[in-house]
Amino acid sequence: MTLQELRYLVAVADTSSFSAAAVKCFVTQPTLSTQLKKLEAHLGARLFERTNKSVHVTPVGAKIVERARRVLAECDALSELARTHRDPYAEPFRIGIISTLGPYLLPRLLPAIEKSLPRLKLVIQEGLTADLLGRLSGHALDGVILALPVSEPNLCQSVLFEEAFWLACRRDHPLAKKRLVRESDLAGYTVLLLSEGHCLRDQALSLCSQNYAQDLDRDDSYRATSLETLRHLVAAGFGYTLLPALALKEELRKGAPVKAVRFDSSRARRTIGLIWRRGYPRAAALEEFAKVIRRSSAAWMQGKGGGK
């Protein structure tokens, strides 16, 4: 049994196709099929049920695939440990970031990183929380910047900053007349939300419906996938929404068609953190990365209700 055979095994399980797995592993299909037959013979177990149209993992095959993933992850970690021991900044850091934060954090963050950690190279991937967590656990990412808390015992986390939510509405909206908005003020007005899967949607629902769920007028007819879409819907008069502090732009400008109003609530905020796998060999470098964000965040949040 070889590590390469285990990689072929996992590739077929992931793609449900011998041909696709061969492409993924950069080998010919006959080579991959021959090696997997050898693996089955060595183990004395049938790993796949093959038909002309599909490939299915057998029950015992599924258990072996699960173990194979762990073996391959440990082998990859050994190689990475040796490589990063020599130089933790030799390889780029693959960092995931939630899509409601990336476009607003990165323009502020990258100059600070270049100044404080010039040898740190970043490969950024945006996505939804569940997808990013999956890629982190699968070793496709080294760390993820997202909204806390994350209840995963095998992950470490470092709090970066707190970001306040602001209410965004048209300047002629009744809520725009208020200096501070309370949660009770939201009842009876239409709230626009991001589509399913965005953690910001759940946070907004929690804030808007607290004690007023029966009065919450939620418009789900628009499946917004970005804060920019929500911003345009608000400007068109379809309702109000919640925007995190870093996303505020023209809403703070006097006379802008969309106005941002502060919340009079300690609950109207989210905690942003950096998470990584427990035992990750370059954790010290990620801690340095987190320190740069923490030092810079006070300036970003000044006047926007950030901080504690």
Image (cartoon, rainbow, N blue to C red):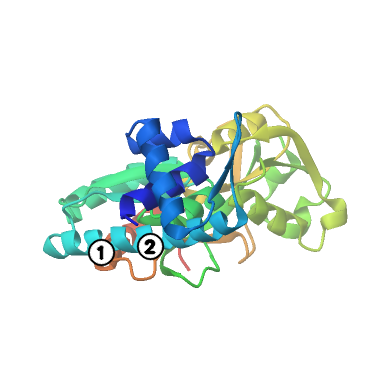
Mark 2 vs mark 1, foreground winner is 2
Question: x and y percent of residue 215 in the render?
Answer: 86, 52
Quadrant in which the N terminus is drawn? bottom left
Q: Is residue 255 visible?
A: no
Q: Is residue 206 visible?
A: yes
**Residue at coordinates 41% horizontally, 57% vertically from top-left?**
42
Among the 4 quarters of the image, the one containing residue 218: top right
Q: Provide the secondary structure element on which disc 1 rests.
A: helix
**Residue at coordinates 16% horizontally, 65% vertically from top-left?**
85
Question: x and y percent of residue 87 in the render?
Answer: 13, 59
Q: Nearer the viewer, residue 270 or 44?
A: 44
For disc 2, the marked residue is 71
Rendered view: 155 above or below 72: below
The reply, left or right, for residue 207 in relation to residue 44 is right
Residue type at the position of mark 1: Leu
Residue 55's disc is none
Q: Nearer the viewer, residue 86 or 63?
A: 63
**Residue at coordinates 22% horizontally, 64% vertically from top-left?**
81
**Residue at coordinates 34% horizontally, 64% vertically from top-left?**
74
Q: Nearer the viewer, residue 105 or 73?
A: 73
Among the 4 quarters of the image, the one containing residue 86: bottom left
Among the 4 quarters of the image, the one containing residue 137: bottom left
For disc 1, the marked residue is 78
Query: Would you say the residues marked 2 and 1 are in contact, meaning their CB atoms lie under 8 Å apart?
Result: no
